[in-house]
Image (cartoon, rainbow, N blue to C red):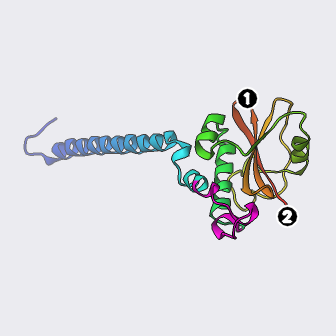
Amino acid sequence: MRHDGDDTMNFSVRRRKAALALGVVAAMTLATTAGGALAQQTTSLADGDDARTYRSLRAVRGHFDGGPWFDDVDRWQGRKHLAMQSLAGRLHRERTTAAAVRDAMGAPDAVLRHGQPARLRALEQVQWLPPAEADSANTAHAAHAAPAVSADTLLWLYQWRGQRDQLLLALVGDRVMAAGWLHDWE
């Protein structure tokens, strides 16, 4: 029953309108946030800071490539090393395509195929990143169980400090299935 002078009914209507307005604002905020997250997910791996850092430092000849010592390139946990660790984790975790790896890091320094003696040595020495923690810098160099590697698995090597320390990516078909490090452990 409605009374023209009764504010109780008007208060109830105002409250419903406010709740509806609040719901609309919340939905718009959620849509904007989700759209932003989607845009971030579709941003190319090659456009990221780590990929740009790696590409810019890849061409620098450091101590282990016959040049002078350069901290950004040669030092443990230097800029190049950190960029490669981050990329390794992301490439592994996201099962990145070979094309996206090339876009982000360039062509590998070496590709090891079935039957090559260097491939066998690499598989014996590699320290694989852990599957669940592939992007963790603290566990990136601990030894973990080897992934299944078949004759079809390609091993891509990216040099960090010349041929002394290298990032190894195991590709099955067109996807990164595992990542690990080959170290000289001087």
The location of residue 174, given as percent across then percent down, is 69, 31
Q: Is residue 160 above or below residue 4?
A: below
Query: Which residue is the site of mark 1?
Result: 173
Q: Is residue 151 above or below residue 71?
A: above
Query: Which residue is the site of mark 2?
Result: 185
What stretch of residues is rendered in magenta? 56-75
Within 10 Å of the Cα at label 1, are there few (<14), some (14-19), or many (20+) other Cα atoms? few
- Tag 2: amino acid: Trp
Q: Is residue 42 above or below residue 86?
A: above
The location of residue 22, given as percent across then percent down, is 30, 46
* Camera-side mark, 1 or 2: 2
Query: Upstream in the sequence, badge 1 or badge 2?
Result: 1
Q: Secondary structure at mark 1?
A: loop
Residue at 63% of width from left, 59% of height from top?
Answer: 60
Q: CA distance from mark 1 to mark 2?
A: 31 Å
Q: Secondary structure at mark 2?
A: loop
Residue closest to the eye, 123 or 7: 123
The location of residue 169, given as percent across then percent down, is 74, 43
Within 10 Å of the Cα at label 2, are there few (<14), some (14-19), or many (20+) other Cα atoms? few
Q: Are marks 1 and 2 in contact (CB under 8 Å)?
A: no
Q: What number of labels is visible?
A: 2
Q: Quadrant of residue 102?
A: top right
> What quarter of the picture does the C terminus occupy?
bottom right
Residue at 19% of width from left, 47% of height from top?
Answer: 11
